[in-house]
Image (cartoon, helix red, strand yellow):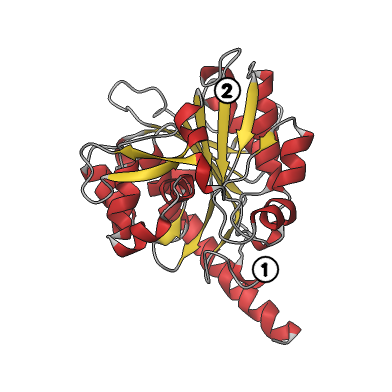
C-alpha cells in the first residue's frame, strides 16, 4: 500500500470514528465547563450517585493514558476502594499478540504500569499479571511493552501458557460453559482487575471486558465451538472482576483481534472504568459504533442479570480533560 493511500484510509477511518464518538458524546464525555478564572473544569454530572441509579460508569476523554486512568480511579473513590493492605492483586490485560503498542492489539503498557503502581500505593502485597497468549508468550509480553512496564512498577509476570496452572471448575447456572479450566491466579487472588484494550474482533464483533476473560481459561476452542457469545457470558457466573478498565485510546476498528498494522487504528483518547462489566462493554460498543444489544454476549449477560446494558439508566461520571 502506498503512503498516499494509507493516509487516505486512515483519514477515512478517523472521520468515521469521530462521527461515532460525537454521536455518543452526551453519554461518554460531556464538554468541560469553565471556572470563574476561565480555566476548564470537569462538567458536573447530576447522574452520579442518584438514588435510582445503581451501576457506575466513568468515561474520561482527551488526556494521556495515565492522566485518564488516574482521573477515572479518583472518580471511583481511589484504588483503595478495591485493594486493601496486604492483598494479592491479579491484573488481566490483553497481552496475547506479538505486536508493538501502536498496533493496539494489546492493552497499552502505560495503562498496565500505572495500574500496578496504584495497587501498590493502595497497599497491595503483590501484583501479578498474565494472559493466555495466542502468539509466543515471551515475545508477546516483551514486544507489547507490558513486560517492561509491569516489572518496572514492581509486578510479577506469569506464564499464561503453562497448562499445569489451569484447574477445572464447575460453573453452576451456565448454559454452555458448564465447566472449564481456569488459571490458578484467577482462582486464588484477593482482587481481580480486568484491563482490556477495545478493538474489533472477527468472531465476537468486539473485544472488551467480557471477551478479555477468555484469556483466563485454557480451552478457548470450546468457546468457539459451543456458542462463543453464550460462553463469554457464562464465565461471569464463575468470576467477575472487581474493577474493569477499558483502554480505548486508539482502538483497532478492523482486522481484529491481531490487526494488520497501524492503519487499522483510530485515535479516540478515551478510557472507561466500571465495577459493572456489562455496562463497561455496553459503553465500549457505543464507541465502536454498535448498539449494545447488537453485541450478543453483552445482550446475553444483561438478560442473565450479570450487569446492565441500559446506558440511559445508570450513574455516569463524565470527565473531559482537555
Given the current orientation, which residue lies at the most extreme top position? Answer: 85
**In the drawing, does residue 307 fall left or right of residue 189?**
left
> Mark 1, residues whose alpha carbon is within 10 Å: few (<14), some, or many (≥20)?
some
Does 274 appear above or below 164?
above
Asked if disc 2 and disc 1 are in contact, CB closer than 8 Å, the reply is no
Specify the farthest residue to the front.
164
**Residue 31 visible in the displayed image:** no
246 displayed left or right of 7: left
Q: x%, y% of residue 261?
A: 66, 71
Quadrant containing the C terminus is top right
Q: Which mark's residue is nearer the viewer, 2 or 1?
A: 2
* Percent of width and height locating residue 76: 51, 25
Viewer-side residue, 117 vs 88: 88
Whichever of callouts 2 and 1 sits on the residue coming sooner in the sequence is 2
Q: Look at mark 2 in the image and give the residue it sits on.
A: 88
Residue 127: quarter of image: top right
Q: Secondary structure at mark 1?
A: helix
Q: Is residue 222 visible?
A: yes
- Residue at the spot x=43%, y=51% of the render? 211
Q: Is 151 above or below relative to 99?
A: above
Q: Which mark is residue 233?
A: none
Residue drawn at (69%, 19%), measured in percent from left and top? Answer: 121
Q: Which residue is mark 1?
A: 262
Nearer to us in this view, 78 or 186: 186
Image position, residue 118 (x, y; %): 66, 26
> Image quadrant for the N terminus?
bottom right
Residue 221 position by quadrant: bottom left
Q: Position of residue 168 (x, y in %)?
A: 37, 40
Instruction: Identify the secondary structure beneath mark 2.
Output: strand
Q: Give the spatial CA distance, label 2 vs label 1.
A: 36 Å
From what the image shows, is residue 80 above or below residue 102? Answer: above
- Badge count: 2
Amino acid at each position: 500500500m502506498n503512503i498516499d493511500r494509507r493516509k487516505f484510509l486512515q483519514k477515512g477511518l478517523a472521520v468515521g470514528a469521530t462521527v461515532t464518538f460525537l454521536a455518543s458524546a452526551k453519554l461518554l464525555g460531556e464538554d468541560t465547563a469553565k471556572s470563574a478564572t476561565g480555566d476548564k473544569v470537569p462538567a458536573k454530572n447530576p447522574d452520579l450517585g442518584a438514588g435510582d441509579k445503581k451501576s457506575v460508569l466513568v468515561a474520561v476523554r482527551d488526556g494521556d493514558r495515565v492522566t485518564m486512568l488516574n482521573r477515572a480511579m479518583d472518580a471511583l473513590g481511589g484504588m483503595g476502594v478495591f485493594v486493601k493492605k496486604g492483598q494479592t492483586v491479579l491484573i488481566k490485560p490483553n497481552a496475547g499478540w506479538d505486536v508493538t503498542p501502536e498496533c493496539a492489539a494489546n492493552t497499552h503498557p502505560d495503562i498496565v504500569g500505572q495500574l500496578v503502581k496504584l495497587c501498590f500505593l493502595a497497599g497491595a502485597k503483590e501484583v501479578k499479571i498474565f494472559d493466555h497468549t495466542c502468539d509466543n508468550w515471551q515475545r508477546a509480553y516483551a514486544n507489547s511493552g507490558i513486560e517492561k512496564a509491569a516489572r518496572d512498577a514492581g509486578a510479577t509476570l506469569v506464564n499464561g501458557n503453562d497448562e499445569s496452572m489451569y484447574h477445572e471448575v464447575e460453573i453452576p447456572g451456565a448454559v454452555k460453559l458448564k465447566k472449564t479450566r481456569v488459571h490458578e491466579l484467577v482462582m486464588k487472588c484477593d482482587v481481580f482487575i480486568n484491563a482490556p484494550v477495545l478493538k474489533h474482533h472477527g468472531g465476537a464483533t468486539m473485544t472488551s471486558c467480557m471477551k478479555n476473560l477468555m484469556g483466563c481459561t485454557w480451552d478457548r476452542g470450546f468457546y468457539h465451538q459451543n456458542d462463543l457469545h453464550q460462553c463469554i457470558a457464562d464465565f461471569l457466573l464463575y468470576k467477575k472482576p472487581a474493577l474493569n478498565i477499558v483502554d480505548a485510546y486508539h482502538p483497532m476498528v478492523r482486522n481484529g483481534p491481531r490487526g494488520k498494522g497501524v492503519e487499522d487504528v483510530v485515535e479516540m483518547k478515551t478510557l472507561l472504568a466500571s465495577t459493572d462489566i456489562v455496562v463497561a462493554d455496553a459503553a465500549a460498543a457505543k464507541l465502536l459504533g454498535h448498539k449494545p444489544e447488537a453485541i450478543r454476549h453483552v445482550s446475553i449477560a444483561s438478560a442473565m442479570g450479570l450487569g446492565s446494558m441500559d446506558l440511559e439508566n445508570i450513574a455516569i461520571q463524565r470527565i473531559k480533560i482537555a
